[in-house]
Image: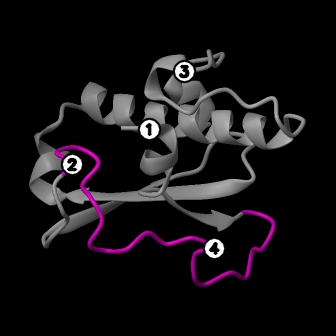
């Protein structure tokens, strides 16, 4: 799955707007579960992430049984991947126009720190 498609499954709030009550971007509640990649249906969980120093508060949804079946390390791996993706998207946003690489999952940019350090 491409980063662009995966990023469409991640919602966010703008951190600079503290009074925001609805997300800046909210993926369809019928999008795909990030764990099994099947269409979401109840019961679901919403996982919220606030990357350290980030400009967005992120969230994604997963089937409750899929998310809860993951170990703590498995959940942290998913959370870290979402934060890595956000960091890369932000870095690409700052690149001069025309310098962006092809958007595939195999060209993952290195990110310093562990997922726990990036979560704050």
Could you tell me which quadrant the C terminus lies in?
Answer: top right
Mark 1 is surrounded, within 10 Å at the Cα level, by few (under 14), some (14 to 19) or many (20 or more) other residues, namely: few
- Left or right? Give the position of 31 relative to 89: left
Label 2 – label 4 distance at C-alpha: 23 Å
Label 1 – label 3 distance at C-alpha: 11 Å
Which of the two discs, 2 and 4, sits closer to the camera? 2
Q: Which of marks 3 and 1 precedes in the sequence?
A: 1
Residue ID for mark 4? 24
Label 1 – label 2 distance at C-alpha: 13 Å
Q: Residue 37 carries which label?
A: 2
- Looking at the image, which residue is at 43% across and 47% down? 6
Q: Which of marks 2 and 3 precedes in the sequence?
A: 2
Residue ID for mark 3? 108
* Count of picture labels: 4
Label 3 – label 2 distance at C-alpha: 20 Å
Q: Which of marks 4 and 1 precedes in the sequence?
A: 1
- Give the vertical position of 14 relative to 92 (above or below): below
User: In this orientation, which residue lies closer to the viewer: 85 or 69?
Assistant: 85
Please tell me whether residue 30 belongs to the stretch shown in magenta: yes
Q: Which mark is residue 2?
A: 1
Mark 4 is surrounded, within 10 Å at the Cα level, by few (under 14), some (14 to 19) or many (20 or more) other residues, namely: few
- Give the vertical position of 8 relative to 42 (above or below): above
Residue stretch rendered in magenta on the structure: 15-37
Q: Which of marks 4 and 3 precedes in the sequence?
A: 4
Circle 3 SS class: loop
Which of the two discs, 1 and 4, sits closer to the camera? 1
Q: Position of residue 67 (x, y in %)?
A: 20, 47
Please tell me whether residue 91 belongs to the stretch shown in magenta: no
- Looking at the image, which residue is at 68% across and 81% down? 20
User: In the rendered structure, are the residues bearing label 1 and label 4 in contact, judged by CB atoms less than 8 Å apart?
Assistant: no
């Amino acid at each position: 799955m491409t980063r662009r498609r995966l990023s469409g499954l991640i919602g966010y709030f703008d951190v600079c707007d503290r009074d925001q009550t609805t997300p800046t971007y909210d993926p369809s509640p019928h999008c795909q579960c990030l764990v099994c990649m099947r269409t979401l249906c109840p019961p679901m969980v919403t996982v919220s992430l606030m990357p350290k120093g980030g400009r967005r508060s992120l969230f994604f949804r997963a089937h409750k049984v899929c998310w809860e079946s993951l170990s703590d390390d498995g959940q942290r791996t998913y959370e870290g991947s979402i934060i890595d993706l956000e960091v890369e998207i932000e870095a690409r946003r700052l690149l001069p126009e025309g310098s962006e690489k092809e958007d595939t999952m195999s060209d993952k940019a290195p990110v310093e720190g562990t997922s726990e350090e990036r979560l704050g």
